[in-house]
Image (cartoon, grey):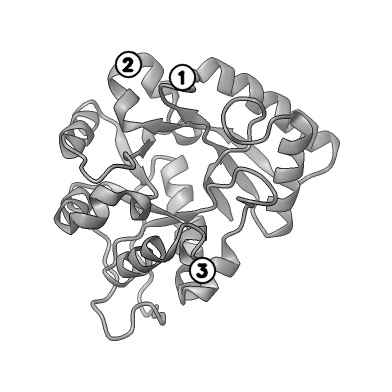
Amino acid sequence: MIDLHCHVLPGIDDGPETIEEAVALARTASAVGIRTIVATPHVNSRTPNDSGTIAHLVGLLNERLAAEAIAVEILPGAEIAITQLAEIEPTELSRLGLGGSRWLLVEPPFTPVAVGLEGLVQGLQRQGHRVVLAHPERCPALQRDRQMVHALADSGVLMSITAGSFAGRFGSTVRRYALELAREGLIHNVTSDAHDTVRRPPGLSEELEHAGLAPLADWLTQEVPAAILSDAEIPPRPDGTTSSAQRGRRGWRWRR
């Protein structure tokens, strides 16, 4: 599996503090079947990380994983706060794409209102970027404004859900909304958003199974992420897949 959103780099944000803790996180990810991790440290006002620092730490961590025979590859990326976009130079922004692709992982605000969110996303798209929206199920503004979620998805934005949301790790409201997004066909990728091995551990398969999304696991954790990393066309949802999250509701659909 490919984990597109993971805070695995040491000493750079609220993820692991040391290289040893980063190695332990990667080892845990390997044990649950994750083979590729995109390192997505926060890029926000508190941690204004840059592509050079990220690339350096990715190289160091890959060296340690190879030395310890841990079969996980780390790729560079970033989780960019929507409020930080205006502070980042265009060339630097391009260097923060997931795995070097045109896809940016953008974090919406944790506020009841997200004025200008659609306009900022459209601005990125006009510049040639493509957008993956991090954990929309945890954004109060998007919980309240379903129309915005649909409009973003219709414009080509991909919705990336944190696996732990299905397990209630962020509360019942978030869990309920994540399942509703699944029923409405508005989930295009599932990630761990892991920060450590205990409180926020890496995991994908078990959470998807419990959410009734096991039939779509390959699409959500392998096919779509692989297309993102290679700047290829996003594959349509496999025909004939059903899940308990979908029964009795509208079928999944890939939105462009």
- The x and y percentages for residue 142 are 25, 51
Judge left or right: residue 109 versus residue 62: left
Q: Identify the residue at horizontal 85%, vertical 39% (top origin).
A: 68
Contact? badges 2 and 1 (CB < 8 Å): yes
Label 2 – label 3 distance at C-alpha: 36 Å
Q: Check residue 48 in the rendering and tell me which mark sits there, or answer none.
A: 1
Kindly state the secondary structure of the residue where label 1 is placed. loop
Q: Name the residue type under label 3.
A: Leu
Contact? badges 2 and 3 (CB < 8 Å): no
Residue under label 3 = 208
Q: Earlier in the sequence, mark 2 or mark 3?
A: 2
Q: Name the residue type under label 1.
A: Pro
- The x and y percentages for residue 53 are 58, 17
Q: Is residue 27 above or below residue 252?
A: above
Residue under label 2 = 87
Q: Residues within 10 Å of mark 2 (few under 14, many from 20)?
A: few
Q: Residues within 10 Å of mark 3 (few under 14, many from 20)?
A: many
Kindly state the secondary structure of the residue where label 2 is placed. helix
- Residue 163 in sight: no
- Residue 35 in sight: yes
State the residue in front, 107 or 124: 107
- The x and y percentages for residue 193 are 53, 47
Q: Is residue 78 above or below residue 154?
A: above
State the residue in front, 163 or 254: 163
Q: Name the residue type under label 2.
A: Glu
Corner quadrant of residue 25: top right
